[in-house]
Image: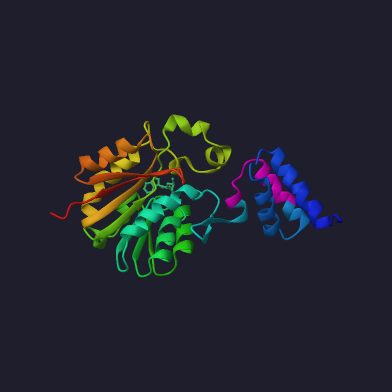
Amino acid sequence: MSITPADEVLSRTVATLRAAGCVFAEEEAQLLLEAAATPAELDALVRRRAVGEPLEVIVGWAGFCGLRVRVDAGVFVPRQRTRFLVDLAVELARPGAVVVDLCCGTGAIGAAIAARVPGIDLSCADVDPQAVRCARLNVGPDAHVYEGDLYDALPDSLRGRTDVLVVNAPYVPTDEIAMMPPEARDHEPKHALDGGADGVGMHRRVAAGAPAWLAPGGSLLIETSEEQAPLTARAMADHGLVPRVSTSDEMYCTVVVGTLPRD
Ligand SMILES: C[S@@+](CC[C@H](N)C(=O)[O-])C[C@H]1O[C@@H](n2cnc3c(N)ncnc32)[C@H](O)[C@@H]1O
């Protein structure tokens, strides 16, 4: 078997990425090769990756629930574990349901639910203008994307009408951000990660506001960690929601689903 120039470029790229500590060096090298139009561009992309820039930002997209989601610099990269939050939301959303993706980032969650449940009425919101711009490109022309602080962003027409309120808000305890991988720590905005002293500060704010926006029988779904789940559930119960904790060992993900009683 002869070694072609393309093989050499691939193995050199893999070696550079591996030396930089990339765990999935082979897969990443393939994606960088596909993204680069010239050898000079490939060198530049590999250099960016070697210093810790997220692969998804470099190539401009992330694979999520079978979709190719655009990811701009400075916007949180959707995590694979969040597929579990999507799965649970899909179980609750019917065609025609009003679905809100709060703290939407790229809008990956809303886009994935809409792809699996045709006909939902989807709204997304985020406080970060860069995230809002990115979400508008990902969710399609039928969805609405709003900018602002949590519920302040939403139009009054959604009050009391939201069937599925899906939230992956920041939930890293402030002191633990420094221990995150450089991709997150150095390249994602602090406001996309920081959940306050115990990581559950945003969950408390989301839970406090939810009853005003949920339809009777509607559900709030919040991604959290296994350790934080009792606190997330407590925040929901404190505001009249009936919480249920679901964990996926396969996807390393925990979600608390809080339902607003019908009466
Ligand atoms: C952990 S990221 C998750 C993004 C997206 N939901 C996902 O799973 O890919 C949290 C998002 O919350 C947004 N955010 C932080 N504080 C917010 C606030 N007060 N109101 C609305 N969005 C907020 C951040 O800009 C960021 O996009």
Q: Is residue 79 visible?
A: no
Residue 91: give x, y in percent of width and height.
34, 58
50 part of magenta stretch: yes
Instruction: Give the color scheme: rainbow, by chain, secondary structure or one colour.
Output: rainbow
As for residue 231 lying within the magenta part, the answer is: no
Magenta part of the chain: 43-56
Q: Residue at x 45, y 59 (%)?
A: 135
Residue extending farthest left: 263
Counting from the top left corner in percent of width and height, residue 202 is at 34, 41
Q: Nearer the viewer, residue 57 or 96?
A: 96
Q: Quadrant of the N terminus?
A: bottom right
> Residue at coordinates 46% horizontally, 31% vertically from top-left?
176
Quarter of the picture holding the C terminus: bottom left
Secondary structure mostly seen in magenta is helix
Which quadrant of the structure image shows residue 237?
Answer: top left
Question: In the image shown, does 228 or 35 lie closer to the viewer?
Answer: 228
Q: Is residue 210 left or right of residue 25?
A: left
Q: Position of residue 40 (x, y in %)?
A: 77, 54
Q: Is residue 212 visible?
A: yes
Question: In which quarter of the view is residue 109 placed?
Answer: bottom left
